[in-house]
Amino acid sequence: MRTNRLSCWGLTALAIAMMTAASSSGCRVDQDDIQRWEKTERGPDKLVAVIAHDKYDPTLRVEAALALVRMKPRGGRRIGIPIMVDAIAQLTDSEIRKTIIAGMVPALVSEIGKPVPVAQANQPAPPDTSIPFKDAAFALLIRENSPGGKIVSEEQHRQALMQALASWVTVDFEHRYDNASQMYGVEQIIKYIGAPAARMLPSLIHNDQRKISDLARIIAANGDKPTKEEASKRVVAVAAHTISAKWLDSVKSTVEEANKANKLKPTEAQFAAQLTALQDEQLKRLFGSMRQLGGRAAVDFCFDFALNKENSAERRALAMAALEGNFDQQNPNDVSRILSLAAADDTPDQVRDLAFRRVGEMRREKVIEKLYEIFKSERWQARWVAAQYAIGMSNTSNIPEILNHLPRGGSPVFAMTEALSYGDWMGNPERMRVQGKDARAQLEPYFRDSNSAVRTSALGWFFGHGTKHDIAALEPFFQDKGSVPKCGSNQSDCDWTCYVDKEGGKPDEKEPKEATNIGEFIRFCIVPTIKDRNEDPSKKKDANQPATVTEKK
């Protein structure tokens, strides 16, 4: 009987064990469950549970993480990627985290590197399936606030992901740059990776590239010097192609099709103007890219272009603007080319102005003598601009030196605008820093100088800074018959004429008066300006703050 009873209990235990095993087998999570949960409403929670619990095999936990990456957008948002990153970040066991990341990296790299889908004829381009994997890889790389440190802590894994991302950017750059479905943009990726990613971009700059401006900006911000130099060479090559007849021929059909679509029938001259306008716009973008990148190739191209008189003034000005901060102040050839543009009588004014701005970027000792050479120009406008920069890079102790370089002779060719400007600029601490004696003290010995250009410039201080209290000091000059400078026969806007109250006229009615001598210059031009002035305008402006101008040594 005992044997039979034991056999009965044994059968019962065996049955219970089999039922338990069957129940356990029915609840086991497998690949099919993972794939199914990608599409269910509660799927994200279940996939997070698989990632979080140690009872699941590491391979299955990796698959759960990748399933969240593959999960389709919900409500227009890829919710799976941030959920996956948070789940891995919250793992307290750093070794388990490393294991899961190690399992994910090859899959992410593989998906990131897949070819871009090709659109069929007359069909929209299919979705870029690499984007969610690229976003997931970048999200993992930048997450550094988990309890255990960086999520991707192994350097080999970080390098593998960054290399894959840097390569991804270079494939179909134009479309991937503009793709609005991605969580992280191209510029974010390159900024994070830095120079190694930027190093791969110059090869994308070519004649057919539509994103040259964006590439130049990104390379300028993130590239090392060799990368910028290479990009500079490539932009110059595109610019050289753009100014060629070959480029004009290549865009003719595009312009013709646009005209046809808009039912336009331009004349031959109008069509040529359309091509020129298109070329202008392209060159404007390219010079902007050169300005950002700098580099010897860009600098030399800009100088050659600006010096070429066959190019339009507008285009030459773009080339000069692109040199800002990029030319080499230690290179005598660079300095010489800028100054030659500034000094040449036939340089267009807008080009000359930008050439002088480049001069203003240089150290005083490099260019001051060259500026004084321009003082000898027959065009007073050129001297006026040169003096503006000479004064701006000097201090008040340099005033005698500057005055001594003004045109010599009893009645030199010299504009009244010059006289009134130079004294004004010298007395303004925002233009000329005070060192030692102030401007008035430095100028006073020249109030009776034999050189009329020097004398009127010194007296011009009162025009900009004198007040009604200075009129008494000017009275001894009222009858001074000393000559004022004269205008050359070919000069414009050079006359010595001021407007004074009209005798017997209405209030505020003015009439022109020519100043033929020093006395008239003071009575007609300076006194009317200062007779109601109570305070030096420059002191009023800077009463509560120090001068901000610094001398360029």
Image: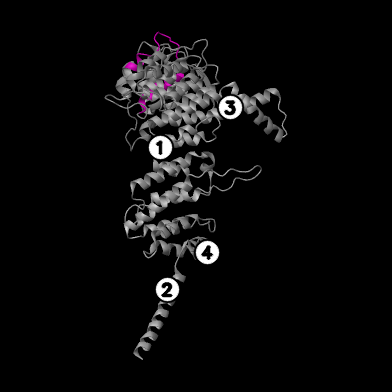
Q: Is residue 413 magenta?
A: yes
The local secondary structure at tag 4 comes to loop
Circle 4 crowding by C-alpha within 10 Å: few under 14, some 14–19, many from 20: few
The kind of residue tagged 3 is Gln
Q: Which mark is residue 279?
A: 3
Q: Which residues are magenta?
A: 401-428
Give 22 or 104, whichever is nearer the viewer: 22
Considering only order in the chain, which callout, 1 or 4, is on the residue closer to the N terminus?
4
Would you name the residue on which mark 2 appears?
21
Could you tell me how far apart the alpha carbons at marks 4 and 1 are, in whole angstroms? 42 Å
Could you tell me how far apart the alpha carbons at marks 4 and 2 are, in whole angstroms? 28 Å
The local secondary structure at tag 1 comes to helix
Considering only order in the chain, which callout, 4 or 3, is on the residue closer to the N terminus?
4
Query: Residue 162, image x and y in percent?
Result: 40, 44
Query: Residue 104, image x and y in percent?
Result: 42, 52
Q: Which mark is residue 222?
A: 1
Q: Which mark is residue 40?
A: 4
The kind of residue tagged 4 is Thr
Could you tell me how far apart the alpha carbons at marks 2 and 3 are, in whole angstroms? 78 Å
The kind of residue tagged 1 is Asn
Q: Name the image quarter holding the C terminus.
A: top left
Give 176 or 458, whichever is nearer the viewer: 176
Considering only order in the chain, which callout, 3 or 2, is on the residue closer to the N terminus?
2
Q: In this view of the protein, can residue 117 be seen by the observer?
A: yes
